[in-house]
């Protein structure tokens, strides 16, 4: 299913909103320290979104999430609800944020280790999951690229890294809405799937684990999704504009 065409003004709004989102996440990486809680971070992000002229998409009637940012810790993969529990040094924490600017939505995420540089298997998990994101973006050759081209490129990196690919969760179209067609799986066959057009905007978001691929979505908060085997997980995401002959990452500075 193809996306509705965007005007040049709408695409420019996504460029501007993407820069705002990227600047918040850049500053968030510096802000987060051991001893802070998820609620501390949520409050800081809420103030930064407002200060930079955007609005928090998660905390709207459209989405209904209880906070402005998803914070997923250790075995939690995505959609973690911020808690009043302090981060500890060495925690693996993913931050996923969607903002609305001039009516258009952009979506980005990253995973970090709190209070120290990642080492060993953890460094491998973060490095390779992020590398798979850029492999997926590099697979976009402009108008005519198929979703399967992106999916296969992500999968190749994650399989080569011997990481568990979270297959039950996918990337998606984004722009007029937070989630819209097409779905962007993190595995697939090159040359298959929806054909992308110039002007389409998608969120590519590899999710991987040090252990198995299966998920657990049965949490009391009704939102958090974690690895079923309790293994550590990572998640990286960018909003990307399809151009005539390539791709433009909208959520980077």
Image: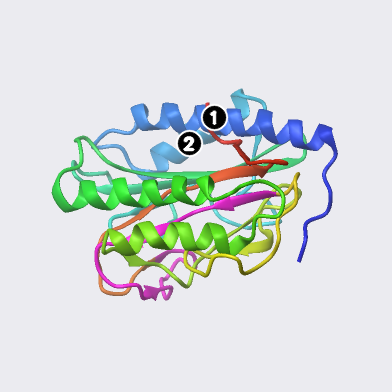
Which residue does the numbered mark 1 point to in the structure image? 47
Q: Is residue 84 visible?
A: no
Of 159 and 101, nearer the camera is 159
Mark number, residue 56: none
Of 211 and 145, nearer the camera is 145
For the residues labelled 1 and 2, the Cα–Cα distance comes to 6 Å
Q: Magenta part mainly helix, strand or loop? A: loop
State the image coordinates of residue 11 (x, y, percent, origin top left): 76, 36
Residue at the spot x=29%, y=72% of the render? 212
Residue at the spot x=17%, y=53% of the render? 121
Above-or-below relation of 190 to 205: below
On whether residue 223 falls in the magenta region, the answer is yes
State the image coordinates of residue 97 (x, y, percent, origin top left): 53, 44
Please count the marks in the image. 2
- Quadrant in the picture for residue 216: bottom left
Q: Residues within 10 Å of mark 2 (few under 14, many from 20)?
A: some
Q: Which residues are magenta?
A: 201-225
Of 132 and 203, nearer the camera is 132
State the image coordinates of residue 106 (x, y, percent, origin top left): 63, 42
Protein image colouring: rainbow
Which residue does the numbered mark 2 point to in the structure image? 43
Residue at the spot x=77%, y=61% of the render? 2
Mark 1: secondary structure: helix
Q: Is residue 152 visible?
A: yes
On whether residue 156 falls in the magenta region, the answer is no
Mark 2: secondary structure: helix
Of 213 and 191, nearer the camera is 191
- Asked whether disc 1 touches disc 2, contact meaning CB atoms under 8 Å apart, the reply is yes
């Amino acid at each position: 299913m193809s996306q509705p065409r965007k005007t040049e003004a709408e695409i420019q709004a996504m460029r501007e909103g993407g820069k705002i989102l990227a600047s918040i996440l850049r500053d968030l990486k510096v802000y987060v320290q051991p001893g802070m809680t998820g609620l501390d971070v949520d409050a800081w992000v809420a103030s930064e979104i407002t200060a930079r002229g955007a609005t928090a998409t998660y905390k709207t009637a459209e989405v209904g999430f209880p906070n402005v940012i998803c914070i997923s810790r250790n075995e939690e993969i995505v959609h973690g609800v911020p808690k009043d529990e302090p981060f500890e040094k060495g925690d693996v924490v993913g931050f996923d944020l969607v903002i609305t600017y001039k009516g258009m939505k952009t979506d980005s995420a990253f995973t970090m280790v709190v209070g120290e540089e990642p080492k060993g298997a953890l460094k491998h998990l973060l490095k390779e999951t992020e590398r798979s994101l850029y492999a997926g973006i590099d697979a976009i050759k402009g108008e005519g690229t198929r979703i399967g081209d992106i999916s296969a490129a992500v999968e190749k990196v994650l399989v080569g890294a011997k990481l568990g690919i979270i297959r039950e969760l996918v990337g998606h179209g984004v722009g007029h809405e937070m989630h819209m067609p097409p779905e962007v799986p993190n595995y697939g066959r090159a040359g298959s799937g929806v054909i992308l057009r110039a002007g389409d905007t998608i969120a590519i978001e590899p999710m991987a684990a040090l252990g198995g691929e299966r998920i657990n979505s049965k949490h009391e908060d009704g939102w958090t999704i974690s690895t079923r085997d309790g293994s550590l997980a990572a998640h990286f995401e960018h909003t990307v504009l399809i151009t005539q002959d390539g791709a433009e990452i909208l959520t980077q500075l």
